Amino acid sequence: MSKYDYLIVGAGLYGAVFAQEAARAGKNVLVIDRRPNIAGNVYTEDIEKIHVHKYGAHIFHTNDKKVWDYVQRFATFNRFTNSPVANFRGELYSLPFNMYTFNRMWGVVTPEEASEKIEEQRREAGISEPKNLEEQAISLVGTDIYEKLIKGYTEKQWGRPCTELPAFIIKRLPVRLTFDNNYFNALYQGIPVGGYTGMVANMLGGAQAQTGEDFGKGAVSVASGSIEVHVGVDFFDSEGAPREDLKALADKVVYTGAIDAYFRYKLGYLEYRSVRFETELLDKPNFQGNAAVNYTDSETPWTRIIEHKWFEFGKDDEGNDIPKTVISREFSSEWKPGDEPYYPVNDEKNGKLYEEYKKLAQCEENVIFGGRLGEYKYYDMDKVIDSALQMCEKENL
């Protein structure tokens, strides 16, 4: 008999939610992760009392009350509102595009004036049916905003000309004829007080992550089941426990890694964008006065700078009592083997390749593929959680 009901590969959001629900249903679960920590890309670490988003900024936002109620079982959320700033060669603009942006760009004061200016530039561009991202952006906000605030940033982020990117990437771009600075049009948003790592640890029942040896130790009871967590265990590491030996430990495997990696890239590589972070601890209380500043010109090599302390609600006052600050510059790059895959490149070519891998996955007995990499989807956090909960329902958990 197998020792565990489920082996979960990946201790990120999808894996942690699945582990929680399985254990609550009386199942025994083993969670492994190749990184030395739990929480996947939402991992936060403490530096000088500042919760640093090590793998990029994550702001939880959702319109799904079921998901919102679910995450609040594991963390208290602050009231952080995402209001990024765009820096174009020293000119600062509000994001999302709103009346502050239009006033700064054109000097217009009323929504009617802003609307007329956008419409004028749409007509001059002569775009009826947008065929790519550039045409879609101009049809939404006009030429000036596209040239200053979209083109350079987007081409750095995706490593391709905007004329070669599909229009749908930018269709959800917020454009408002109001003075609303809230980037997300969501009923609920915020960041867990104390960081995401604590929230994920609570999902895992408070299990203390063990290193890759001594399987069978450190399990915690959750309802009538249990969760055991081991970090520093690579599912593909031939020098450690071979993959088939790990799979034999459980009746079923929940795999949240890259789907093409699971099949050893036998059909070819799916494409991703990767991100490199340069993080600095600075000897000053305030570097840029905002959590996120996007650099939208093409000359600046980074896409944005995150100042982590401003994710904490109320830090305008108390944050300045912390004499230091932590910033991260983000550099986007084409993924290559060995890099962290961040954003699936959801174009036609990769979509077709994924469908072929999906057919292989459907034939893989007793293996569930889930999450951003397992399903090759650009998921927001709430969608990852919802996807995991739906899979738990299918498993009768």
Image (spheres, rainbow, N blue to C red):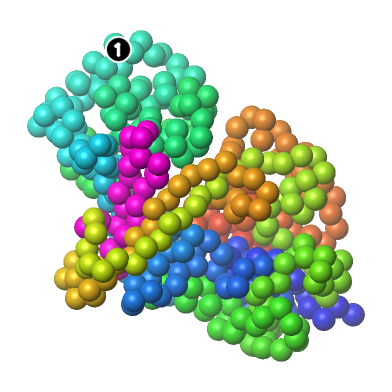
Does dot 1 land on a helix, a strand or a loop? helix
Residue 131 as seen in the image, left or right of residue 150: right
Kindly identify the residue that appears in the image at 23 percent across and 67 percent down: 284
Number of residues whose C-alpha sits closer than 10 Å to that of mark 1, classed few (under 14), some (14–19) or many (20 or more): few
Specify the quadrant that holds the C terminus: bottom right
Closer-to-camera residue (203/284): 284
Q: Position of residue 332 (x, y in %)?
A: 48, 44
Is 352 situated above or below 205? above
Q: Position of residue 211 (x, y in %)?
A: 67, 80
Q: Amino acid at mark 1?
A: Arg
Q: Can the viewer see residue 375 in this picture? A: no
Kindly identify the residue that appears in the image at 52 percent across and 79 percent down: 202
Q: Can the viewer see residue 323 in this picture? A: yes
Which stretch did the figure color magenta?
289-312
Is 300 included in the stretch rendered in magenta? yes
Residue 1 as seen in the image, left or right of residue 169: right
Closer-to-camera residue (73/13): 13
Specify the quadrant that holds the N terminus: bottom right
Residue 329 as seen in the image, left or right of residue 1: left
Kindly identify the residue that appears in the image at 35 percent across and 22 percent down: 139
User: Residue at label 1?
Assistant: 123
Residue 204 location, quadrant: bottom right
Q: Residue furthest right?
A: 1
